[in-house]
Image (tube, coloured by chain):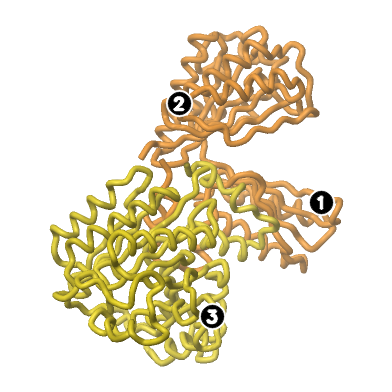
Chain colours: A orange, B yellow
Amino acid sequence: MAKLVECIPNFSEGRDEKIINGLVETAKSVSGVTLLDHSSDASHNRSVFTLVGDEEGIQEAAFRLVKFASENIDMTKHTGEHPRMGATDVVPFVPIKDITAEECVEISKKVAKRINDELNIPIFLYEDSAQKPDRKNLARVRKGQFEGMPEKLKEEDWAPDFGERAIHPTAGITAVGARMPLVAFNVNLDTSDITIANNIAKIIRASGGGFKYCKGIGVMLEDRNIAQVSMNMVNFEGTPLYRAFETIRFEAKRYGVNIIGSEVIGLTPAKALVDVAEYYLQIEDFDYGKQVLENHLLN
Amino acid sequence: MAKLVECIPNFSEGRDEKIINGLVETAKSVSGVTLLDHSSDASHNRSVFTLVGDEEGIQEAAFRLVKFASENIDMTKHTGEHPRMGATDVVPFVPIKDITAEECVEISKKVAKRINDELNIPIFLYEDSAQKPDRKNLARVRKGQFEGMPEKLKEEDWAPDFGERAIHPTAGITAVGARMPLVAFNVNLDTSDITIANNIAKIIRASGGGFKYCKGIGVMLEDRNIAQVSMNMVNFEGTPLYRAFETIRFEAKRYGVNIIGSEVIGLTPAKALVDVAEYYLQIEDFDYGKQVLENHLLN
C-alpha cells in the first residue's frame, strides 16, 4: 500500500484566470498526484488547492506549483483582504494513509530546502515542522505580511529556517510545514444572540482554556437569524468532534439554549466521523484500519 | 471513477489446505480484483472469501472460483455443521462504489447464466436478484440442503432459475444474487438474563414486526456473563445502525437494563458509521460522496 499525503498550498492570486489555470495545469502534471479541489476568492485574491499523492509525487507537485507561482505572481502588486506574505503563501502537508506526522515533517523539510535551493525563496517552517515554539502558529509567522517581512527578517528571532534574511523580491517568503487534517465544524444554536456563541467559542478553544486542538469563534448566520459556534478542529484525534459537540451542548444549557444542527464544511477524513460513531454507539475494540472496507481499497 | 463491486462467495470446504490455497490462487488470478479477506472454519467445513473489483473483473473472478470449486469439491462426501447445497454454496454481489443495486442484480444474472452454460451447475437467484418472493431468503432456498435438492427441484415451485431440474452430481446447486452490504452489529446489555436479549431481538427484527432490514437474535456472552442482541443489518441505509441502537436502548429500559457497549464484527463500509455520526451530530446537508476525502481517492 502506498503512503498517501495531502498538500493544500495557498497562492496569492484569486482573480487572474490565466494564472489560476496555469496552477491547475501544474498541479495535474505529476503522475501519482490527484488534484481533488481548488477554489479561488477574488476579494481575498487567493486560491486554495487540495492535492493528494504518494510521498515522492506530492513533493514534486508542491515544488512545481511554488515555482510556477514565483514566476507568475508579483507580490509587490498584490492586494486582497486575506493576510499573506508570499506568492505561495503557505504549503501544509497532511498525513492521510499509512504515513506518520513525523514523516510529513520530513517531507515538508525536503520541499522547503528544495524551494530555497532552486528558487531562492526563504522559508519559515511552521505547525508540526516548526523549529521554534513561536513558529507553530501561522498567524504569528505571517504577522507583518509581505510588506513588513524585510524588516521582520532582520529581527534576531526571525531568521528564516531556510535562506538568508531577505525576501524574494517578487515571491516574498513561504511557510512550509506538516499538520494534521483539519475539519471545519460548525454548531448551530437556537438563539439569535451572538454573545452566547461568542462566549461558548471562547471557552471551547485552546486559547480560552478549552480543548487543545480546537479553534473557535462566534458567527451570526444572518439569513437564518441564528448564532453559530464556528470551529476548526485542527487534530480530530486529539480533540474529537463529539467532545466539542457535547461540550457546546452542556455549555449552551446555561443559557437555556439548544443545539439545532451542525455543519461540516468541505472535506473531512472518514475517520473524523467514524470516531464519532464509535463514541455514540459505544463500540468496543473497533480497528479503523482493518474493519473499514474502504481502507483496503485505497492504493 | 471505476465502479466497485464486492463478492463474498462461500465454499463448502474448510479443512483441505490444498483446495483452500487453490481458491486463494484463483481469487488472485484476475487483474483489477483484490482478495480482501478469506477465512475457513473446520467444524463448518466452509470458507468465506471477500473480493472486490471492477464490474468486469469481479464477474470473471467469481466464475473462475465457482469453476475451481466444482472441479475440486465433491459434495457427495461433504460433512459439516453449516447448512449447504453446493460446492460453491452462495455467491452474493454487493455494490460498493458508483454502482447501483440494480446493476449488481444484472451482474449476478450474467454470472449465474455463465456458470450454468459452461459448468452445467443449476442456479437459484436469491436476495435482490430473486425472481420469486420465496427465493429472496437464502435459508428458504437452501432448505433440504445438498442431499434433499434432487427431490426439491422436482417440486413445482422449485425449478432452478438457470438449468434443468437436476443438481450437478458433485457440485450440487449454487445461489447467486445481489444484496446490500451487511454489517454485523451486536449490542451488549448489563444483564445476564438472556431472555431480555431474546425479547429485544424479537421486537427489533423484521420478522417480529421490527425494522425491515434488521435480523437479530439474543446471544449469551458466557465469558463476560452478559446478554447481547446480535444483529445483521442487511441494508444500513434502509435501517441505520443508530436507529436499532436507540431502539434497543429504550426497549431495554423497560427491564431496568442499560447498554454497556457494542461490537462491529468484521468489515463495514465507512458510510454505515458516517451515517451514525451525521445523526448524533445533527449534521445538516452532508454530502457523503463529495465531503469524505477518501471517496476521492478510490480508483
Q: Earlier in the sequence, mark 1 or mark 2?
A: 2
Q: Quadrant of residue B10?
A: bottom left
Query: Do residues under tags 3 and 2 come within 8 Å of each other at their CB atoms?
Result: no
In the image, residue A206 lies at what x, y percent?
61, 46
| SS under mark 3 | helix
In the displayed structure image, the side of residue A243 where residue A39 appears, left or right: right
Q: Which label number is shown at residue B249?
A: 3
Q: Nearer the viewer, residue B37 or A59?
A: B37
The residues bearing labels 1 and 2 have C-alpha atoms spaced at a distance of: 41 Å
Is residue A29 positioned above or below B276 on the image?
A: above
Q: Is residue B278 above or below residue A98?
A: below
The residue that disc 2 covers is: A57
Q: Position of residue A236 (x, y in %)?
A: 53, 49
The chain letter under disc 1 is A
User: Could you say whether the residue bearing mark 2 is in a helix, strand or loop?
Assistant: helix
Residues packed near mark 3 inside 10 Å, few (<14), some (14 to 19) or many (20 plus)? some
What is the chain identity of the residue bearing mark 2?
A
Q: Is residue A168 left or right of residue B225?
A: right
| Amino acid type, residue under disc 2 in the picture | Gly
Q: Amino acid at mark 1?
A: Leu
Give the total of numbered labels: 3
Q: Which mark is residue A221?
A: 1
